[in-house]
Amino acid sequence: MVAQKITIEPVTRIEGHAKVTVRMNAAGKVDHAYLHVNEFRGFEKFCEGRMVFEMPLITPRICGICPVSHHLASAKAGDDVLGAPPPRPANLLRELMHMGQIVQSHGMHFFELAGPDLLLGFDSDPALRNVVGLLQANPDLTVKAVQLRKWGQEIIHILGGRRVHPNFAIPGGVNKALTKAERETILAGYDDALATTMAAIKIMQGWAEANMEDINKFGVFPTGYFGLVKPGNTLELYDGEIRLTSSTGKELEKFDPRNYLDYIAEHVENWSYLKFPYYKKLGYPGGVYRVGPLGRLNNSDRMATPLADAELKKFKQLNGGKPVENTLHYHTARLIETVYAIENVKVLLEDPDILSNDILNTCRDPKPYGVGVIEAPRGTLIHHYWMNENQQIEKVNLIVSTGHNNWAMSEAVDSVAKTYIPDANHVTEGMLNRVEAAIRAHDPCLSCSTHAVGQMPIVLEIRDSADQLVNTITRD
């Protein structure tokens, strides 16, 4: 038997473009499986020269799935570089919008993207393994799932004037106060959103119990864990210190997000446009870590709302109090975070300052650079801007959530391929779907995450009206 290559392209039910190549050796066994992120976005480069106050409207165009995360991280970087910390009511309103983003993104992922695999089966008919199949199998649950996402999007719409690419946060605060009527509109959807998510947690827990064999062999491996926390190592999604823990749960670092470059470096492989961040002191790959829901829950000791904190305690016992290494438990963690976000919406709306008109700090104390960090649905998002005396951007660095998880996604793909593909002569669609599901579990946003490494190779073909090649221009 000769060596073979299986290509999965495109990877489905994710945001962005990727492919997987599974390389089979001469014995017909999986030699290695690679995740190739094969798209390029040039935001870091073409933002140079723009005014810093424009960035909260430019950078959300990186992605239509998580524009709120880029919008808020960019505004926070603007606060920092312009020396304009927002008033407390503005921060409450920003966090409220962020909770809406967490709810709509996490809700969509569990039900519409991951749900078809979990609720219909990895080996089910691919023609039905989608949201339409879910609607046919359980119309009541599917409608509730759509309503959950709608509620999260409505929070964004009320604050930012639109559900996608909102215009709300600006350096120094926000541009709109919340009215009492808007507050009551959001609160009206609270009970249903919470009930749907708690039902989803029971569904996930039941699925995990019934599929424990898969849970325990599907992409299980040790890494570090990375994310924002508040005092007491309380999970934080909007603002806090960055905490990094080891594969055993030991704290390695806790630091001001502005100092991220002292702790993080990025490795490059020639088979992906997406870089591989790692903890400098342990090097690559010893210093790799995971972010996002699984990473955040492993990295936190408590949650600030009661129902979510109770679910966190259950989560911590899935591996006897040790970090949960099972890739499929990303889904469990994601739902627990959704409960926290929903509960936190009510906490924020009941704060007396939420209706204040003190929403903008107009004072300025500019600095050469500023950093904004937030926990996007998919993990820690870093915006770093360098600014000149005219308040123009000179340089931009983005480390996007999915980038932090690049090593983990690649490892999960390789592990799942080796676990589920027995040999080259017995490859089924369901086996390949499991390889894709290893990527989906991380809920990647690949178009957010890619950026240039040196010069990008370009081939430009010039053809005449008869489609005849006239000239070829290349840049290596």
Image (tube, rainbow, N blue to C red):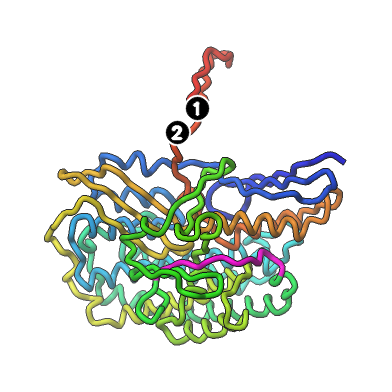
Q: Residues within 10 Å of mark 1 (few under 14, many from 20)?
A: few
- Which quadrant of the view contains residue 42? top left
- Image: magenta residue range: 217-228
Indicate the amino acid at tag 1: Asp
The quarter of the image holding the N terminus is top right
In this rendering, position of residue 81 left or right of residue 28: left
Tell me: residue 335, above or below residue 461.
below
Q: If you read the primary sequence from the N terminus, does the residue marked by circle 1 or circle 2 appear first?
A: 2
Image coordinates of residue 36 in percent, x first then y, are 60, 45
Residue at x 51%, y 52% (from the top left corner)? 276
For label 1, the residue is 476
Residue at x 44%, y 53% (from the top left corner)? 265
What secondary structure is found at the residue carrying circle 2? loop
**Residue 297 seen from this side:** no
Do the CB atoms of the residues marked 1 and 2 lie less than 8 Å apart? Answer: yes
For the image, the number of numbered tags is: 2
What secondary structure is found at the residue carrying circle 1? loop
Which of the labelled discs sits on residue 196, or is there none?
Answer: none
Indicate the amino acid at tag 2: Gln
CA gap between label 1 and label 2 equals: 7 Å
Image coordinates of residue 218 in percent, x first then y, are 69, 65
Q: Nearer the viewer, residue 238 or 255?
A: 255
In this rendering, position of residue 383 left or right of residue 366: right
In this rendering, position of residue 251 left or right of residue 74: right
For label 2, the residue is 455
Residue at x 50%, y 27% (from the top left corner)? 476
